[in-house]
Amino acid sequence: MSIISIEDLPIEGERVFIRVDFNVPIGKNGEVEDTTRIDAALPTIRHALRKKSKIILASHLGRPGGKVNKKLSLEPVGKILAEKLDTEVILTDYPVGDVAEKLAQDLGKSKILLLENLRFDPGEKKNDPAFAKKLAGMAEIYVNDAFGTAHRAHASTTGMVYHFDRKGAGFLLAEEIRFFQKLLKTPEEPFLAILGGAKVSDKIGVIKNLLDRVQSLIIGGAMANTFLSAVGVEMGNSRVEKDKMVLCKELINSARARNIKFLLPKDLVIAEDINSKAADITTLEKGVPPNMMALDIGSATREYFAEEIQKAQTIFWNGPMGVFENPVFAKGTNSIAKNVAENKGLTVAGGGDSVSAINKAGVFDKFNHISTGGGASLEMMEGKNLPGIMALL
């Protein structure tokens, strides 16, 4: 892709608008609970500081619905950012308006202005031209470093970009693009995709696109329930998308026709509900009893999946194998995390729950790349063009 890197943009002393992804979890005490996304943006911000740029940072946080919500203010993020960069971070009272514009115009070199939550204004999600123009009017150069929102055609990711002749990608976004292009264009074989999570409907496009690229596919999590039900396994009270069962059969048959390994669980960890403190294991022959539900993959499946992981040269993983938030149902997800981490090939994990699972397993630094965007990474793996990336071309 012909996208200019921030390294090649003439940002010295200029006002640079950097779209970052500071959509981080805020605890009940009003403090940031996980700084992963803030940390990911630091290399780009530090580069701009070294170039004595006048830095304007912008992000959304949560879903305030186009209204001011103090619980979703970026103030806690600004405090963390100031500590990590050891410099003052000025927070505006609103993403646009007289105050924000004045602060942007008066900003000195190597100074940082953080715009308040973009989604406090309804114009952000609506990609409103007037709101986009106000954002663009604050700077001379635009940089997108927010992969987690690159699949959204919002004012700060697409609308405002077209007001700039000088625009490009931050280090994080450039790295995300590089790894996903490697997966989709030039993966070393065997290429294995591991997909988990709650719903088949969320991953249909990914599976269809990957069937032309992978040599094997592992399916786990609640989405495996629908595939298992489609091949005749009794799933009891498990979550099953009945309207997707025909499609699941078609996907399995399509994989077999292409000589692709399509691995489903061999046994399941079952309990009455997700809060259970004890669990049983059932085989596919026995099925899941009517009053029980599948909540993780069993020990035989963990070994079965581990053998396939060891053979792979390229691995993409998105989605847990069970309700890993409950330690009783976390063994499957932990097993995947540790086995993928031990693989010597190219290992890439999608965002969201996968990142949380990898952190819990203590193997974050063992992956070649861990994406900061769950939805964006899935759309990339579907082969879609992301609006936030296309706007930079």
Image: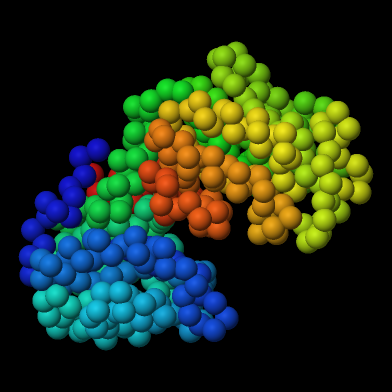
Residue at 72%, 39% in the rendered image: 299
Spot occupied by residue 270 in the image (x, y as percentages of width and height): 81, 46
Q: Position of residue 57 (x, y in %)?
A: 28, 70
Q: Is residue 127 visible?
A: no
Relative depth, front residue between 16 and 32: 32
Q: Nearer the viewer, residue 256 or 264?
A: 264
Q: Nearer the viewer, residue 194 or 123?
A: 194
Task: Pinpoint residue 3: horizontal percent, then vertical percent.
Answer: 21, 44
Q: Is residue 327 above or below residue 337?
A: below
The answer to whether any part of residue 106 appears in the image is yes
Q: Is residue 172 left or right of residue 263?
A: left
Q: Quick check: 241 above or below 370?
A: above
Residue at coordinates 34% horizontally, 35% vertically from top-left?
A: 181
Q: Quadrant of the C terminus?
A: top left
With 182 as the anchor, is 120 left or right in this view? right
Displayed quadrant of residue 115: bottom left
Question: How is the protein colored in the picture?
Answer: rainbow
Instruction: Kindly indicate the quadrant of the structure image that contains residue 112.
Output: bottom left
| Horizontal side, residue 370 vs residue 43: left or right | right
Quadrant containing the N terminus in the rendered view: top left
Which residue occupies 51% across, 22% down? 215
Q: Position of residue 183 (x, y in %)?
A: 39, 33
Q: Residue at x 20, y 71 (%)?
A: 55
Q: Count of labels shown?
A: 0
